Amino acid sequence: MNSAPAKIVIKSPREVELLRAAGRVVRQVLSELGALIRPGVSTAELDARAEELIRRAGGTPLFKGVRHPQARMPFPASICASVNEQVVHGIPNERPLAEGDIVSVDCGVRLKGYCGDAAETFALGRPVPRVERLLAVTREALEIAIREIGPGQRWSRVAKQMQKFVEDNGFSVVREFVGHGIGQEMHEEPKVPNYYDRSQRQVDFELRPGMTLAIEPMVTAGRPEVKLADASGWAVVTRDGSWAAHYEHTVAVTSEGADVLTNGR
Ligand code: MG
Ligand code: MG
């Protein structure tokens, strides 16, 4: 099997540049929010600033108004802000962040019809060593994927290396949420898991130049299982209460490797 499944949209160089332009806005937002994050700031304030920056750049927030079968209401904010044991999809709120907290900020932007999606976990002050390590290992899992991506490579090979690195460091990879293709839609085919087991055999795919993927390891300091936090149906937390980190880049596969579209370049 040399060809990718037909449903994976291959982008032209021009389309890759449009994704990069959207990705630049995402990076600008994450950088600015990173500089604002300190004890006493609420995630609602971060969200307001994010929306302002996105709209000023001529973009629209990708997450606002998104519907999910499990959720009671469309997602109400421009960023997801997931604190401590929250893994993803945290709804920004007025509670002030405190020294020692970690907050995973996920930002998506549509600009001129193309999407960018990236996430980063920020620590407030100096976290305890195990939390510091959780962030470093999750960030490195994403870097491993970026280094390992190449044309002709099967995704499962990349995913196995991310998973091995995380588990060798005593942490766990979340299974229920995975990365995704991205282009004119935020979520396109294929699914891009951060682990590999036999259940993934049927959905494995070959990396080809022009594929654009949002790669987003979600790592917990304890067990991998997650659940919905509350009746809103949005925020996802670890079942065991352990803390979680989340890093994401939008990446284009090239003839040589990976081209990161959300690093601000
Ligand atoms: Mg995201
Ligand atoms: Mg994503």
Image (cartoon, helix red, strand yellow):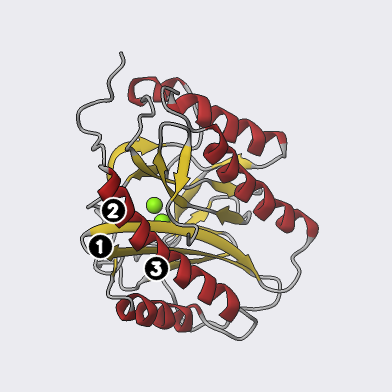
Q: Position of residue 34 (x, y in %)?
A: 57, 73
| Quadrant for the N terminus in the image | top left
Q: Position of residue 253 (x, y in %)?
A: 40, 37
Answer yes or no: disc 2 within 8 Å of ligand 2.
yes
Residue placed furthest toward the right: 129
Q: Which mark is residue 186?
A: 2
Nearer-the-camera pick, 153 or 20: 20
Instruction: Give the left or right position of residue 233, taking residue 112 as reference.
Output: right
Q: Give the quarter of the image for residue 254.
A: top left
Which residue, given by chain and number where applicable, does mark 3 sit on?
A: 25
Residue at image point 45% right, 23% down: 153
Residue at image point 57% right, 81% down: 36
Q: CA distance from mark 1 to mark 2?
A: 10 Å
Q: Nearer the viewer, mark 3 or mark 1?
A: 3
Using a 10 Å C-alpha cutoff, classify the residue at mark 1 as few (fewer than 14 neighbours), some (14 to 19) or many (20 or more): few
**Looking at the image, is mark 3 or mark 2 earlier in the sequence?**
3
Q: CA distance from mark 3 to mark 1?
A: 19 Å
Task: Give the amino acid type for the residue marked by disc 3 in the picture.
Answer: Val
Q: Ligand 1 shows up in which quadrant of the image?
A: bottom left
**Looking at the image, is mark 1 or mark 2 earlier in the sequence?**
1
Instruction: Give the left or right position of residue 96, taking residue 68 as reference.
Output: right
**Looking at the image, is mark 3 or mark 1 earlier in the sequence?**
3
Which residue, given by chain and number where applicable, does mark 1 sit on?
A: 66
Task: Give the amino acid type for the residue marked by disc 2 in the picture.
Answer: Met
Q: Nearer the viewer, mark 3 or mark 2?
A: 3
Q: Position of residue 16 (x, y in %)?
A: 32, 49
